[in-house]
Amino acid sequence: TGGTLMGIARKLRELNPEIIVIGVEPTEQHHLSGLKNMRSQEKPDIFHEDELNEVVTVTDAQASYMTRALAEEEGLIVGMSSGAAAYAALTLVKKLDDGIVVTIFPDGGERYLSTDLFVGGSRKA
């Protein structure tokens, strides 16, 4: 996920140096597989935090909420990392007066089908 973000950020900045790149990370005590809190984990060599304009921290509850919302409202079965990315993207959209927000959904929701993530209609954030 970090490698994808770094590669896309570099390429987009070649095309437009004004692009703003925002990373998403879970809280330190998270349960989101696949995502790492970069303050508490060893950073991979490919990850360069100085290439990010901002990092948005997303809680487990926020990621779960958005993962269920994407399934219920958009028909997208995505994983918790994608739910976190979508939550952060929508948070940023609310702050913008003008512009375009693009996000990457790094995981699918197939492995969560055997859990209660998609069961019921509760989407509390």
Image: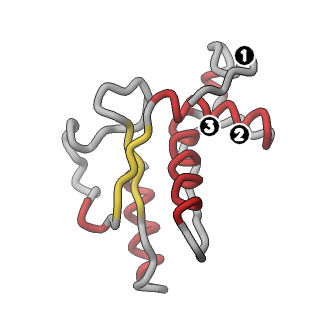
Q: Position of residue 89 (x, y in %)?
A: 55, 55
Q: The C terminus is located in which quarter? A: top right
Q: Quadrant of residue 71?
A: top right
Q: For mark 1, what is the residue?
A: 119
Question: Looking at numbered disc 3 in the image, what kind of residue is underneath it?
Answer: Met
Q: Position of residue 119 (x, y in %)?
A: 72, 16
Of callouts 1 and 2, which one flags the residue occurring earlier in the amino acid sequence?
A: 2
Q: For mark 2, what is the residue?
A: 70
Question: Looking at numbered disc 1 in the image, what kind of residue is underneath it?
Answer: Val
Q: CA distance from mark 1 to mark 2?
A: 13 Å
Horizontal placement of 97 versus 2: left or right?
Answer: right
Q: Point out which mark residue 66 bears.
A: 3
Placement of 96 over or under 118, stated as above or below: below
Question: Looking at numbered disc 2 in the image, what kind of residue is underneath it?
Answer: Leu
Q: CA distance from mark 1 to mark 3?
A: 14 Å
User: Residue shown at 34%/67% (left/top)?
Assistant: 53
Of callouts 1 and 3, which one flags the residue occurring earlier in the amino acid sequence?
A: 3
